[in-house]
C-alpha cells in the first residue's frame, strides 16, 4: 500500500483508527476483553439502528427466549462487537509468536488428510465477530484463499488486504467467480461464508432457525467441481483464548436439489452459532429478503 495515495484529509479518521488498532494489539488478552466489553456496552447504547436489528434477529431466531433473555443476549453480542475491535487489531498487528499462544486447533487432521489426498477443499464458515482473527490463526497453520467483500473505506480496505497478504493469505473478491474457481481447482483451500442475504435472485428460501431465509447456493455449486469436499470450520472466543474446530466433510453433498443443499449448510451454521450465540453477527439484516411479498422484519 502506498500511503501517499491516502493523504486526503477525509482519511484522517481512518489513520487514527489504524494507529489505535496498532496500540490495541499490544494489550494482553484479558485487558482486550475487559476493554472491549466496555466499548460494546457503549455501542449498545449509541448504535440504535443496529441494536434494533440485533434484537429483531435474536427474537425471531430464539422464540423460546423471553424479552429479558433476548435483551441480555443482545447486550452480550455488543460486548463481542467491542472485543472484535481488538480481535481485528490482533489479526493485523499482533506478533505471530504471541498469537500462537492464544488459540488451539482441534481436529486439524481432517483438513490435513483431505489435502494429503489431493482433495479440493471449501471451508464452510459463518460471519462471527471473531472471523477476521480466526483467519489469521488459520494462516499460521495452513495456506488458504480468503473470499472477501471489499470495504467501503478505501484506506481500510487497502490496509486489510495488505495485512492478510503479508500473513500469507490469497485474497479473492467475492464477485470474482472465475478467480474463485481457478484457485479452488489449483488445490488451495478456500474460506467461504454463505450466510448473508444477497437478494432473492441469487438465493433459495430455506429454514434458518425455523425462518424461511434467502440462502445462496454458491457453496454447492463450487462443491460440484470434481474431487471437492466441504469441511465445516467453527471458531470462538473462550475464557482463556480462542478455539478453532474442524468437522468432518459433509457427506452426500451436494445433491441435485438446491433446496436440500441450502438447507444442509444452514443447519450446520445453526449448530455453529449455538456454540457461541453472542459471537454471531446479529447486526446483519439476515432476513431482509422475504418470500411471497411477506412483510419486512425490519
Image (tube, rainbow, N blue to C red):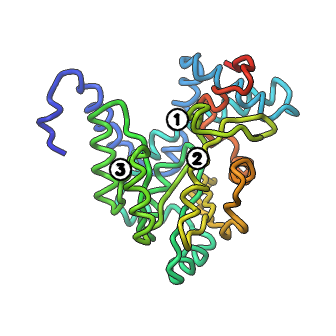
Residue 179: which quarter of the image?
bottom left
Along the viewing direction, whichever of 172 and 39 lies nearer the viewer? 172
Q: Position of residue 115 (x, y in %)?
A: 51, 77
Q: Residues within 10 Å of mark 2 (few under 14, many from 20)?
A: some
User: Which secondary structure, mark 2?
Assistant: loop
Q: Earlier in the sequence, mark 1 or mark 2?
A: 1
Q: Nearer the viewer, mark 2 or mark 3?
A: 2
Q: Position of residue 104 (x, y in %)?
A: 56, 67
Eyeballing the image, is 170 above or below 69?
below
Quadrant that contains the N terminus: top left
Question: Going 70% across and 53% down the picture, which residue do you hit?
Answer: 261
Question: Going 53% across and 78% down the picture, which residue do you hit?
Answer: 112
How far apart in space, not on screen, are marks 1 and 2 (Cα)?
A: 24 Å
In this view, the residue farthest toward the right is 64
Q: Position of residue 193 (x, y in %)?
A: 55, 49
Say whether residue 158 is visible.
Answer: yes
Say whether residue 270 is visible.
Answer: no
User: Which secondary structure, mark 3?
Assistant: helix
Question: Going 44% across and 72% down the picture, which residue do you hit?
Answer: 187
How far apart in space, not on screen, are marks 2 and 3 (Cα)?
A: 24 Å
Residue 175 falls left or right of residue 42: left
Along the viewing direction, whichever of 259 and 234 lies nearer the viewer? 259
Question: Going 70% across and 60% down the picture, which residue do you hit?
Answer: 255
Q: Are marks 1 and 2 in contact (CB under 8 Å)?
A: no
Residue 57: which quarter of the image?
top right
**Which residue position holds label 1?**
82
Eyeballing the image, is 10 above or below 87?
above
Q: Are marks 1 and 3 in contact (CB under 8 Å)?
A: no
Residue 259 falls left or right of residue 121: right
**Which residue position holds label 3?**
92
**Which residue position holds label 2?**
194
Q: Earlier in the sequence, mark 1 or mark 3?
A: 1
Amino acid at each position: 500500500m502506498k500511503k501517499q495515495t491516502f493523504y486526503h484529509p477525509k482519511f484522517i479518521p481512518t489513520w487514527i483508527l489504524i494507529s489505535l488498532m496498532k496500540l490495541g494489539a499490544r494489550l494482553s488478552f484479558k485487558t482486550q476483553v475487559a476493554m472491549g466489553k466496555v466499548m460494546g456496552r457503549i455501542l449498545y447504547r449509541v448504535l440504535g439502528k443496529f441494536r434494533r436489528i440485533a434484537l429483531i434477529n435474536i427474537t425471531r431466531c430464539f422464540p423460546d427466549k423471553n424479552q429479558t433473555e433476548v435483551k441480555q443476549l443482545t447486550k452480550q453480542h455488543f460486548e463481542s462487537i467491542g472485543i472484535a475491535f481488538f480481535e481485528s487489531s490482533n489479526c493485523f498487528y499482533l506478533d505471530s509468536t504471541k498469537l500462537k499462544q492464544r488459540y488451539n486447533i482441534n481436529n486439524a487432521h481432517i483438513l490435513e488428510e483431505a489435502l494429503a489426498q489431493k482433495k479440493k477443499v471449501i471451508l464452510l464458515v459463518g460471519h462471527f465477530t471473531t472471523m477476521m482473527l480466526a483467519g489469521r490463526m488459520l494462516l499460521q497453520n495452513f495456506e488458504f484463499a480468503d473470499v472477501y467483500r471489499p470495504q467501503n473505506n478505501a484506506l481500510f480496505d487497502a490496509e486489510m488486504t495488505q495485512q492478510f497478504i503479508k500473513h500469507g493469505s490469497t485474497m479473492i473478491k467475492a464477485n470474482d467467480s472465475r478467480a474463485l474457481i481457478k484457485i479452488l481447482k489449483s488445490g488451495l483451500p478456500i474460506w467461504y461464508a454463505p450466510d448473508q442475504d444477497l437478494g432473492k435472485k441469487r438465493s433459495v428460501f430455506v429454514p434458518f432457525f425455523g425462518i424461511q431465509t434467502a440462502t445462496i447456493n454458491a457453496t454447492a455449486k463450487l462443491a460440484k467441481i470434481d474431487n471437492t469436499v466441504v469441511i465445516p470450520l467453527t471458531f470462538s472466543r473462550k475464557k482463556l483464548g480462542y478455539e478453532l474446530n474442524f468437522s468432518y466433510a459433509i457427506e452426500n453433498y451436494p445433491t441435485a436439489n438446491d433446496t436440500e443443499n441450502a438447507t444442509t449448510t444452514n443447519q450446520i451454521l445453526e449448530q455453529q452459532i449455538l456454540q457461541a450465540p453472542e459471537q454471531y453477527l446479529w447486526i446483519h439484516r439476515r432476513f431482509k429478503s422475504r418470500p411471497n411479498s411477506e412483510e419486512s422484519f425490519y
